[in-house]
Image: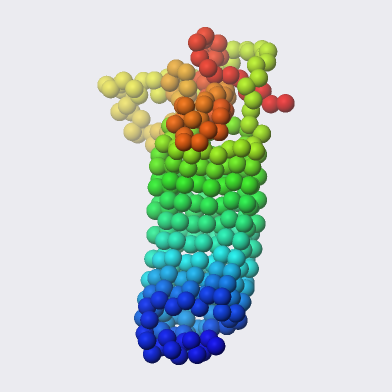
Amino acid sequence: MADTLLLRAVKGKPKCLNLSSKHLTQIPRLIGKLECLNILHLKNNKIQDLPVEFSALTKLIVLNIGNNELEEIPASLGQLNSLETLHLFGNKIKKLPNKILGGLRSLTFLNLNNNDLRTVTPSINKLVNLKYLSLDGNSLTSLPSELCAISPLTELHAANNQLTALPLEIGFLVNLTKLYVQKNKIRELPEGIGKLYNLKVIDVAANELRIFPTELNKLPLKELYCEENPLIDHVPIKSVQEEEVLTLKEICARFIMSELKARWSYLRIAIRHYPSVKEMLGQASKCAFCNRSFLNTWLECVTFVDAKKDLKTMNSPGRIPIRALLCSYKCFNTPGHSFYGVAFP
């Protein structure tokens, strides 16, 4: 039947061809004659591989081969330089071949939902124009930091996996607007999320989160989903505070960072000759209370915000705990703020 359909198609030189749900187990080599194809649908069949002749479809822009029986991504796809949208959901794919990814530089949309992926190769960063990536329903335990080099990415879906963390470099995904990582085992979100200034939707429901990153409230969020997480409760308990003893390194760092704020400070000129010191101070944090900079001695606190009222989300996840770092017990013991010490059972 497939041969008959393709013979008819060859005569008509179509730009769009739908062979979905045709009970196909293989694609005839005649497919290579359809060099004018822009859109090809092959979903809901029993295809295990694609013929070498498939690589002749260099004008193909959209390919849907979801719900088949592919155990690996066919090598012929690596020649489809014009391909922009690729659906591979519902197969048995176990890995992403480096060589094939390198040939898909025009790809903007990739759907790999419900496969058998356990890892994502660092070569994913070869998809330099990717805007939408979906990895839902696999067996991933981590995502490579190289993924964060794909700066055009606007949507990332990795729900229903086994993720325990997200890459620390996630802040480099400056164009990300939607992040879906619900139903994983994520214990803590990286502070880099606070640099995703275009992020509007984040779904972290059904994970193992206790608290949110410090700068979450600076994001332009419209939707936040965080149900079924063991979030910290607002339960006041007695505690004993002792004034900390700062190290000499911390005292010097705080002094230098304070001096650097002065426009005509000698240190602003001198630090140019000490790039390693400049780099170290670049990792500093700011006190959530007094706004002064500090290096690596702090009090980890929590503040509770109403997501709908304070974050302006359209949905209402209620009061959520957000991490706050204070530079000293002096700030912590100053009355009039809403920061609480963190106590874990």
Front-most of residues 159 and 270: 159
State the image quarter where residue 341 is shown: top right
Task: Please determine whether, in this image, residue 345 is positioned above or below residue 95.
Answer: above
Q: In this view, does 235 lie to the left or right of 251?
A: right
Q: Check the image and tell me how it is coloured.
A: rainbow
Quarter residue 256 falls in: top left
Residue at image location 47% in from the left, 18% down from the top:
289
Of residues 241 and 162, the one nearer the viewer is 162
> As rendered, which of 80 and 284 lies closer to the eye?
80
Task: Work out which residue is located at the far right of the displayed protein and give it.
Answer: 345
Quarter of the image where the N terminus is located: bottom right
Q: Return the x and y of residue 110 as percentages of the image width and height.
A: 48, 62
On the rendered structure, is 140 left or right of 75?
right
Q: Quadrant of the C terminus?
A: top right
Q: Residue at horizontal 59%, vertical 69%?
A: 67
Percent coordinates x, y for residue 272 in the rendering: 33, 33
- The residue under the point 41% across, 88% down is 10
Residue sitting farthest toward the left: 264
User: Residue 119, can we see it?
Assistant: yes
Give residue 158's position: percent from left, percent from top: 56, 52
Q: Which residue is pictured at 65% across the width and 51% down the height?
A: 162
Splitting the image into 4 quarters, where does residue 300 fall? Answer: top right
Query: Is residue 131 positioned above or below 295 on the image?
Result: below
Count of residue discs: 0
Mark yes or no: residue 47 visible.
no
Q: Position of residue 179 (x, y in %)?
A: 50, 46
